[in-house]
Image: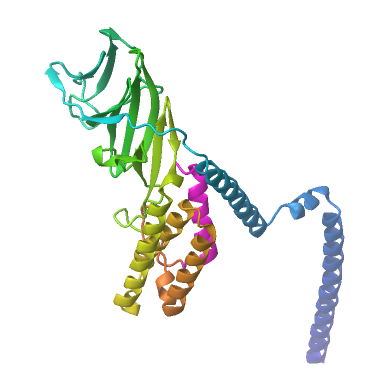
């Protein structure tokens, strides 16, 4: 009898728990549905749903890069077609100026102008008392004042070069910032035919520099040939970085890009880059193909073709060789591994992203 009562009691408890669970499920479902309906009608939820997805934002960014590149590139091509005008053969290279040691400064003189590099009174950031620190500018024995805007913060002045053009003389001060692989700036002054002296330009050359070899005479005009280092560390080491050249003329107080006058040089360099790519493919084992080795050559070929105005050939060549390496060795698309630049060999570089990166870097500097 007691066992029977116990069994009945257990059965009732089980049934009650089952009913309670069913009621809980029904209540929870009803509450959730009501809550979902309220959320869908909330204005805040509408705002969240209207926010562009990361994919959409990435597409917008790429479209902006494309638009920026196309505008600046088309402007560049149009500018290069403008004729220079009358030939002028009066340029002369005065070359590197030698200083006279007049402690506490070194004196560089040209015409009525004098440039003084003073000794350092306090140690620099490295604890050195290097004498090449402050620049004093004088004309007709009177101090000029602030020689440049912004004031030059000289660390090491490697050399001073001068050019003559008719009655004008242009003086270039090359300053190294003290950084690793960077940076050189050229502070340029003009002493005109009436002996008026003024600063006209600061050329940021990154890792490039001016020398007498940078001066080119062509068709009666004088050009400055400058290395462009905007692709340094671009998916590779500093030593393997792609470079290309730009050509400038001096017109009064201005430097004007005249790459169009060297179209044949760009075409020859692009052909040389293509030969280097073919040679690399021919003489490198498939398992040894590396993105950090062949991609700089491809960048140089593309950029040199662009600078020559061969737009279609530039991009079709990029597509062809990128796809060729991809087909021969998919593993060779693994990125360069560098903690310095954030690249990782666990990432695979895509053709689309590689092309966008090139356009972005080209557009950022107005081709100078």
In the picture, measured across the screen, residue 351 lies left or right of residue 135, that is right
Residue 285 is situated, as x and y percent measured from the top left of the image, at: 31, 78
Question: Is 345 within the magenta?
Answer: no
Question: Looking at the image, is 131 positioned above or below residue 334?
Answer: above
Q: Residue 159 or 207: which is nearer the viewer?
A: 159
Region of the chain picked out in magenta, as a range: 348-368
Magenta region, main secondary structure = helix
Looking at the image, is 114 positioned above or below residue 239? above
Q: Percent x, y for residue 255?
A: 42, 32
* Image point (54%, 61%), residue name: 312
x, y percent for residue 109: 21, 18
Query: Measuring 37% from the left and 58% from the top, which residue is drawn there?
Result: 268
For the C terminus, give its image quadrant. top left
* Closer to the camera in the image, 92 or 95: 92
Can residue 226 be spotted in the picture?
A: yes
- Can residue 336 be seen in the rendering of this structure? no
**Image quarter for residue 178?**
top left
Frontmost residue, 184 versus 339? 184
Locate residue 180: give its quadrant. Answer: top left
Q: Is residue 170 left or right of residue 301?
A: left
Tell me where residue 227 appears, x and y as whole percent. 34, 45
With 122 as the anchor, is 182 left or right in this view?
right
């Amino acid at each position: 009898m007691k066992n029977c009562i116990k069994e009945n009691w257990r059965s009732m408890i089980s049934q009650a728990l089952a009913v309670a669970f069913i009621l809980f499920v029904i209540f929870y479902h009803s509450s959730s549905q009501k809550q979902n309906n309220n959320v869908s009608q909330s204005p805040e939820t509408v705002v969240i749903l209207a926010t562009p997805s990361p994919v959409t934002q990435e597409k917008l960014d790429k479209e902006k890069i494309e638009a920026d590149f196309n505008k600046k590139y088309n402007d560049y091509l149009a500018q290069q077609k403008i004729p220079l005008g009358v030939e002028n053969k009066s340029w002369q290279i005065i070359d590197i100026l030698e200083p006279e040691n007049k402690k506490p400064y070194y004196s560089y003189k040209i015409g009525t102008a004098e440039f003084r590099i003073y000794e350092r009174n306090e140690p620099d950031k490295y604890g050195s008392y290097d004498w090449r620190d402050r620049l004093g500018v004088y004309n007709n024995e009177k101090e000029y004042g602030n020689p440049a805007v912004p004031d030059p913060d000289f660390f090491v002045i490697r050399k001073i070069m001068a050019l003559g053009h008719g009655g004008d003389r242009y003086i270039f001060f090359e300053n190294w910032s003290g950084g690793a692989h960077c940076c050189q700036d050229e502070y340029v002054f003009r002493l005109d035919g009436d002996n008026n002296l003024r600063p006209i330009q600061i050329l940021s050359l990154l890792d490039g520099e001016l020398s007498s070899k940078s001066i080119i005479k062509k068709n009666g005009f004088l050009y400055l040939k400058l290395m462009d280092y905007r692709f340094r560390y671009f998916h590779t080491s500093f030593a393997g970085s792609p470079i290309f050249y730009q050509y400038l003329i001096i017109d009064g107080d201005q430097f004007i890009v005249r790459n169009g006058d060297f179209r044949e040089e760009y075409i020859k360099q692009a052909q040389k880059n293509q030969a280097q790519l073919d040679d690399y493919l021919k003489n490198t084992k498939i398992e040894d193909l590396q993105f950090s080795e062949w991609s700089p050559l491809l960048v140089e070929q593309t950029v040199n073709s662009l600078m020559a105005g061969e737009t279609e050939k530039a991009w079709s060549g990029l597509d062809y060789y990128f796809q060729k390496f991809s087909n021969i060795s998919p593993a060779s698309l693994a990125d360069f591994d560098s903690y310095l630049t954030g690249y990782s060999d666990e990432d695979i570089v895509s053709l689309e992203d590689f092309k966008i990166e090139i356009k972005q870097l080209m557009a950022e500097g107005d081709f100078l």
